[in-house]
Image: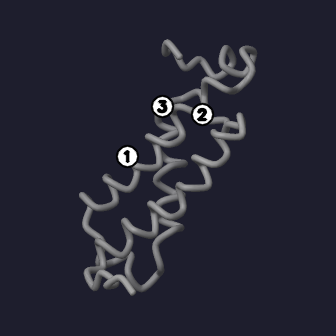
Amino acid sequence: MPAVPNDVQAVFLDRIDRRVKILKTLLDAGLGVYQAAEEQQRKRAIDQVVRLTARPSELPQLTPETLAKACEIVAAHLEPMQKVLPHDVQYRNRLRKSW
């Protein structure tokens, strides 16, 4: 049985990694999660998902760097999903990226 990390930061990031596996599964199935058009809205939504993933007891112990890393992990899994959305959604989303 593998050793369970004891550090709060490591446990939290491991939980984030397990949770984003569903996003990879959705992408493999050709599905995507719609993101808001505005950059600030997207960042707030991702931050909220990350904070809701943390247990209430560990949230005060998490460093801003750990939360930022978790946000980057989630964003990295959401970004590729945008290319599978219909073109009209991509246009409305105004994400000016070359998919």
Q: Are marks 3 and 1 in contact (CB under 8 Å)?
A: no
- Closer to the observer: label 3 or label 2? 2
Residue 22 lies, in percent from the top left, at: 62, 55
Q: Within 10 angstroms of label 2, few (less than 14), some, or many (20 or more) residues?
A: many
Q: Residue furthest front?
A: 1
Q: Secondary structure at mark 1?
A: helix
Secondary element under disc 2, as helix, strand or loop, is helix
**Residue occupying image coordinates x 50% and y 64%:** 18
Q: Identify which amino acid the numbered label 3 is placed on.
A: Glu
Residue 90, percent across and down? Answer: 66, 19
Foreground pick, 55 / 81: 81
Which kind of residue does numbered mark 2 sit on?
A: Met
Mark whose residue sits in front, 3 or 1: 1
List the residue tagged with mark 1.
72
Residue that mark 2 sits on: 81
Nearest the viewer among 12 and 54 is: 12
Question: Is 92 situated left or right of 43 in this image?
Answer: right
Cα–Cα gap, marks 2 and 1: 15 Å
Front-lying residue, 23 or 48 = 23
Q: Earlier in the sequence, mark 3 or mark 1?
A: 3
Query: To which residue does mark 3 refer?
Result: 39
| Between discs 3 and 2, the one toward the N terminus | 3
Measured in 3D between alpha carbons, the distance from the residue under mark 3 to the one under mark 1, in whole angstroms, is: 14 Å
Tell which circle, 2 or 1, labels the residue nearer the N-terminal end.
1
Q: Are marks 3 and 2 in contact (CB under 8 Å)?
A: no
Q: CA distance from mark 3 to mark 2?
A: 16 Å
Quadrant where the image shows the N terminus: bottom left
What kind of element bears circle 3? helix
Q: Categorize mark 3 by other alpha carbons within 10 Å: few (<14), some (14-19), many (20+).
A: few
Task: Locate residue 81, reporting x and y percent.
Answer: 60, 33
Quadrant in the picture for residue 12: bottom left
